[in-house]
Amino acid sequence: MSGAVNVNVNANVNPNKPFRIFVGYDTREHVAFEVCRYSIMRRSSIPVEVIPIKQSELRKNNYFWRERNKLESTEFSFTRFLTPFLAGYEGWAVFVDCDFLYIGDVKELSEVVDDKYAVMCVQHDYAPKESTKMDGVAQTSYPRKNWSSMVLYNCGHPKNKVLTPEVVNKESGAYLHRFQWLEDHEIGSVPFVWNFLVGHNRVIDGDPSTYPKAIHYTSGGPWFEAYKDCEFGDLWLKELEEYEKVKEKEKKLG
C-alpha cells in the first residue's frame, strides 16, 4: 500500500495551462473512455485537457509499430509509455486507463506532485485472483501490477527522456510496466484512493481517507454485460446516465 506523500508547490504544474491527462483508449471500450473523460471534466476545479491515446493514430504517425502479442489485454498496454513523448517531455502529465471513474477533483491529484520523482503512482501490492478479465482476455500477474495504470509523469525529468517511440516499441513488458528505466527512489507514492482497485481495496467505515477518489474497474466494468453488477457498478451507470443526458442536451442545442 502507498506510504506518505510529499505535497509540493511545483513549478512544473503551471496554473495558467490545463492539467494534461492522457487516457488509454480501446475501441472495445469507447463508452468507458467517454465516461472516464466526463467524470474528470465534471469534477475538476482546474482547467484540464483530456487526451485519448489511440493506437490507430499513433501508428498513422509512425510513433507506434510493434506487433500486438497475446498478453496485451488492451490497445494501450504499451502505448501508455509514450505519455512523456506525447507531452513534449515538458511539465507533469497523467496517464490513466480508460476503465476509471473519477469521484474526486483532479486538482487534489495535481497537488501531490513532487519534482524529485520521475514518476508517481499508487504502489499496489496486488495479485489478481481471476484468470480472465473484461471480455474473456487473459489476466496476467507480475511484480508492480497496476502501478502503470495511473501514473503521474514528470515529463521533463531526464530519466523519462529514455521513453522514446523506439524504446517503447522494442522494450519488454517487464521493463516498461515495472519502471525498470528508473531507480526505486525515483518512483514516488500516491494515496491508493486515486487508483482504488475494485475487488481489492476496501472502504473502512468511519474513515473518509479510504473512500475512493478514482475507481478502477481493473477486472471489468459495467460496460461489459458480465460485470453489470460489480462493486461500485451503480456509480458508473449513474455517471453514464448523466453523460448521456448532457450529450442529448448538446445535440438538441445543435
Image: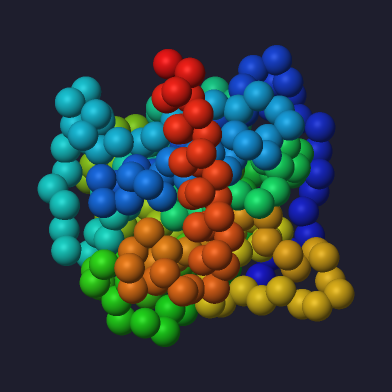
The x, y position of residue 21, in whole percent, is 53, 35
The percent position of residue 219, horizontal first and vertical second, equals 40, 70
Q: How many marks?
A: 0
Q: Can residue 101 be seen in this view?
A: yes
- Between 193 and 35, the one lying in front of the other is 35
User: Residue at position x 68%, y 61% from top?
Assistant: 212
Q: Residue furthest left?
A: 67
Write the residue at 54% across / 73% down. 231
Q: Position of residue 208 (x, y in %)?
A: 82, 65
| Residue appearing at x 61%, y 55% in the figure | 214
Viewer can see residue 78:
no
Rendered position, 224 above or below 229:
above
Front-most of residues 5 and 201: 201
Q: Where does the image place residue 24, in percent across and percent down from the top left?
A: 39, 44
Task: Tell me the quarter of the image containing the N terminus.
Answer: bottom right
Which picture quadrant has residue 107?
A: top right
Going by the picture, which residue comes out furthest to the front? 252
Of 181 and 78, the residue lying toward us:
78
In the displayed image of the protein, which residue is found farthest to the bottom?
A: 129
Asked if residue 232 is positioned above or below residue 214 in the image, the reply reads below
- Along the line of sight, which residue is nearer the eye, 231 or 128? 231
Residue at coordinates 81% horizontally, 44% vertically from top-left?
7
Q: Which residue of the protein is positioned furthest toward the right in this rendering?
A: 206
In the displayed structure image, the side of residue 250 where residue 175 appears, left or right: left
Quadrant occupied by the C terminus: top left
Q: How is the image coloured?
A: rainbow
Left or right: residue 13 versus residue 41 is right
